[in-house]
Image: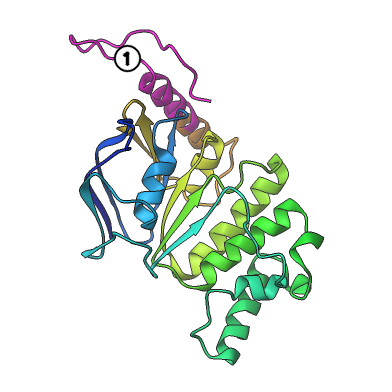
Amino acid sequence: MLDIQNLSKTYADGTRALAGIDLAVAGGEIVALIGGSGCGKTTLLRLVAGLDRASAGSIALDGEAITAPHPGVGLVFQEPRLLPWLTVADNVGFGLGAVARPERRARVAHALERVGLAEHAGRWPRDLSGGQQQRVAIARAFVASPRVLLLDEPFSALDAFTRKDLHSHLLALWAETRPTVLIVTHDVGEAVALADRAVVMRPKPGRLDETVLLAAPRPRDPAAPRSEAAARAILAALDRSLRPVPAEGRAAAPDANWW
């Protein structure tokens, strides 16, 4: 289990990025973090990845504190960040240096097969489309069998058809080992398609505001009534997250857009 307790982050210039984050994510659960720009979604992911230090609070994976990059935590960024001097296969296997060569080759080949790129193993990243490069990045993250996988808007730069295709590849890889997944997204449809629950964040400072449960079995039809109802619930929660709450507790009109 990923256990986040009373997590806060204040930067050196005094900016309060996060305040009092409490979040428990079960093994194998997929949680989507969604909210307006500047609400601390990426900051939260960087803290869980061990790339930044929290100002207060704690992060633990199965009872082990995370204060630095952890071998059980994988991260996929908005852009693929592939090494241009390595082939596709070598990029996927880059983090497996301690694994025996036959096993490494087998794991890389399997991961590339699962993302539909087996025939591109010997090609260079520059020869691939943007969607194919992101498939390589996803395969690289899964091949190390992380217990937690963090995804920071990995499909935001892709067209709708490519994004839907990558959702299928992601879920296929996830189904094999079922790591805990935290995905940051601005796409409500993406949250509905992938997650077990969507956690809406409120800005200034970033904190958790509402949770929408997404219980329909996957794969999910975006036009199905349950999917449409879930999308409406998330949109309503996003709207409420941007309404300042006066002292008497009544929400005022929003002064910003979540997108």
204 lies above or below 95: above
Q: Magenta stretch? A: 231-259
Residue 211, image x and y in percent?
33, 36
Going by the image, does 2 lie left or right of 188?
left
Q: Residue at x 31, y 51 (%)?
A: 53
- List x then y, in percent, for residue 91: 64, 70
Confirm whether the magenta stretch covers residue 249: yes
Tell me the quarter of the picture where residue 92 sits.
Answer: bottom right
Q: Give the main secondary structure, helix, strand or loop, of the magenta stretch.
A: loop
Q: Nearer the viewer, residue 253 or 152?
A: 152
225 inside magenta stretch: no
* Quadrant of residue 104 within the rendered picture: bottom right
- The residue to which callout 1 is attached is 244
Residue in view at x 39 percent, y 25 percent: 237
Q: Position of residue 73 (x, y in %)?
A: 40, 63
Q: Position of residue 250 (x, y in %)?
A: 25, 10
Residue type at tag 1: Pro
